[in-house]
Amino acid sequence: MANRLRTGIDVLDRKLDGGIPAGSIVVLSAQPASQAELFLYELTATRGTLWLSLDRTAESVIASIEQTPANTGDPTVRHISGEAPLDNAGKLVSALPETSNLIVDPLDVLEAQEPHSRFRAFMNDLQNHIVNTGSLAIVHCLDGRDVPPLRDTTEHFADVVFQLNTTTAGDEVENRLAIPKFRGGRAPTDIIKLNLVEEVSIDTSRDIA
């Protein structure tokens, strides 16, 4: 069995037989108006992390991590701006050290770049470097009103896909996590109901659907 890297979220690590295989690209697909960032914050506590922010400034991301009650680490945060985000992101990815976390938040900005062949080249380079360093890449994909045309390509590259669905039911906000894709392992068949308040935890008030 491939070396497993913990996500830092106990409920997920138990479901995934200890974590995610080293060298994997993971898609975290979630609505913009959700608590999905808690997944990213808690991941930073597991090992050295490089956080590439495509929207928010580095200062904003760092402040959010410092303010969250969840258990976190001290990631290196870089804001990628300008007219060549794929090139700038690629340079930072190429310097990722052994057994590290890489967070790309959100990937949508890179998926929207043209020509599309450049994004595919970026994903191939990313995949090669993550495998060679035995690292873990989490790409945050916004599942909102304007989904980029290359989202299918991203999910095809991904080794693991987390789909977080946030809905309102009555007077409650409900979060359900599905893992429809798990390359190199067995994908859980059940949907996990989560509490996403101060940290990521299983919702014990309801049965697992």
Image (cartoon, rainbow, N blue to C red):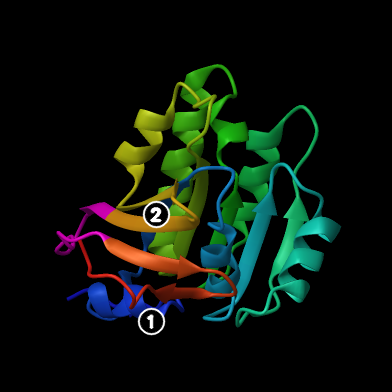
Q: Tell me the quarter of the image containing the N terminus.
A: bottom left
* Stretch of the chain drawn in magenta: 179-191
> Which residue type carries mark 2?
Ile
- The image position of residue 149, as x and y in percent, is 45, 21
Which residue sits furthest front?
A: 170
Q: Tell me the quarter of the image containing the C terminus.
A: bottom left
| Quarter occupied by residue 88 | top right
Which-is-in-front pick, marks 2 and 1?
A: 1
Residue bearing mark 1: 10
Q: Please give the name of the residue rendered at 72% of the width and 30% of the height, measured from the top-left corner.
A: 84
Residue bearing mark 2: 25
| Quarter occupied by residue 115 | top right
State whether residue 194 is above or below residue 58: below
Residues 166 and 123: in front is 166
Q: Left or right: 42 with respect to 127?
A: right
Q: Residues within 10 Å of mark 1 (few under 14, many from 20)?
A: some
